[in-house]
Amino acid sequence: MRRLTLLRHAKSSWRDAELADIDRPLNGRGRRDAKAMGADCSRRIPPPAIALISPARRVCETIELFFGAWRAATPAIIKLDELYQAGKGDWISIVKTYKADAKHLLACGHQPGLGEFAAWLCKEAIGELPTTAVVSILLFDEQLGKNSGKLDFVRRPRELSE
């Protein structure tokens, strides 16, 4: 069995309208949520061996804070230009490329492609994926196909206080 964990980047800042989209940093809430979700995941699942990430600044900052709070996690972090604005098909292709390299793979990127990929992979309803949401999926065979994953959990920052 393998695990795939999908993380949407944390909330970004729109303070500087001159910045290109790829260069936007996290805002205060995003920084808090990234740390909180990393700490929450550290109590729920084993650490990933590899993290595939978009090169966007907000994704890089999310990952740094997320794993900073998950002290036991020291994955190999691989930045992939293809994950910036990736659609469902891009996600499928990239995860297929790396899935044999680790028992637990984490990927961090953007909507709507990330959510569309998660919905394609699981038959269970996933629902809304706000910023810093985590979806963890169990994969029971070597194939990566529609409805081939079993949803382990979905966690959103607002649920941490519940």
Image (cartoon, rainbow, N blue to C red):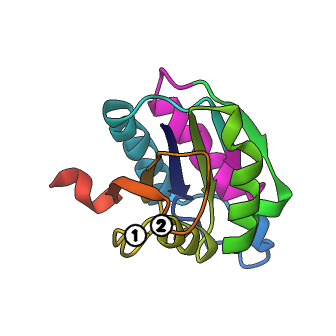
Q: Position of residue 11 (x, y in %)?
A: 51, 64
Label 1 to label 2, Cα distance in Å?
A: 5 Å
Residue at (42% x, 49% y) in the render: 32
Residue at (79% x, 77% y) in the render: 18
The amino acid on which the numbered mark 2 sits, given as a three-letter code, is Asn
Q: Is 73 on the left or on the right of 113, as rendered? A: left
Q: Position of residue 81 (x, y in %)?
A: 84, 58
Give the position of the C terminus as an image quadrant.
bottom left
Alpha-carbon neighbours of circle 1 within 10 Å: few (<14), some, or many (≥20)? some
Q: Is 121 on the left or on the right of 53, as rendered? A: left
Residue at (48% x, 37% y) in the render: 1
At mark 1, the secondary structure is loop
Q: Is residue 106 above or below residue 71?
A: below
Quadrant in which residue 70 is drawn: top left
Q: Is any atom of residue 152 visible in this view?
A: yes
The reply to whether callout 1 and callout 2 are in contact (CB within 8 Å) is: yes
Quickly name the residue at label 1.
123
In the image, residue 154 lies in the stretch drawn in magenta: no
The amino acid on which the numbered mark 1 sits, given as a three-letter code, is Lys
Quadrant in which residue 77 is drawn: top right
Q: Position of residue 152 (x, y in %)?
A: 34, 50
Extreme left residue here? 162
In the image, residue 54 lies in the stretch drawn in magenta: yes
Q: Is any atom of residue 54 visible in this view?
A: no
Using the image as rendered, state which of residue 58 and residue 79 is in the foreground.
Answer: 79
Residues in magenta, as a range: 52-73
At mark 2, the secondary structure is loop
Q: Is residue 122 above or below residue 116?
A: above
Quickly name the residue at label 2.
147
Alpha-carbon neighbours of circle 2 within 10 Å: few (<14), some, or many (≥20)? some
